[in-house]
Image: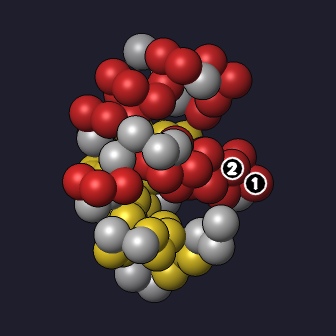
Amino acid sequence: MNITHDEAGRRFSLPTPAGQAELIYHLAGQVMTITHTFVPPPARGSGVAAQLATSAFEFARQHQLKVVPACPYISQGFLPRHPQYADLLPQA
């Protein structure tokens, strides 16, 4: 799938037949805060959100950023199933 990253707009996006899916984040210094993930209802359950999240976490890893999962999908859905990204979370 063709995920695009608009660094200036702070978003990852992916076109689906049902419409545009996106993950939105804020960047402050070396901290990426993921604030919102949206997938059009007909495209939900197909792994689109996980693909967007993976792209965001891989971007963070490549740029040595810490990730604050402010979006419920990221904190409650994605991260429990993808512990390989736990090292990118700020220390509690």
Question: CB atoms at circles 1 and 2 under 8 Å apart?
Answer: yes
- For residue 58, which numbered disc appears in the image? 2
Q: Decide if residue 26 is on the left or right side of residue 60.
A: left
Q: Position of residue 81 (x, y in %)?
A: 54, 19
The residue at the point 33 percent across, 74 percent down is 19
Dot 2 lies on which element? helix
The residue at the point 57 percent across, 50 percent down is 51
Query: Disc 2 marks which amino acid?
Result: Glu
Dot 1 lies on which element? helix
**Crowd around label 2: few <14 · some 14–19 · many ≥20 (10 Å):** some
Q: Is residue 90 above or below residue 26?
A: above
* 50 or 47: nearer the viewer: 47
Q: Is residue 9 above or below residue 50?
A: below
Q: Decide if residue 61 is on the left or right side of residue 74.
A: right
* 38 or 60: nearer the viewer: 38
| Image quarter (top left, top right, bottom left or bottom right) of the C terminus | top left
- For residue 62, which numbered disc appears in the image? 1
Q: Position of residue 32 (x, y in %)?
A: 46, 52
Q: Is residue 15 above or below residue 85?
A: below
For this orientation, the residue located farthest to the right is 62
* 72 or 27: nearer the viewer: 72
- For residue 51, which numbered disc appears in the image? none
Q: Position of residue 53 (x, y in %)?
A: 51, 47
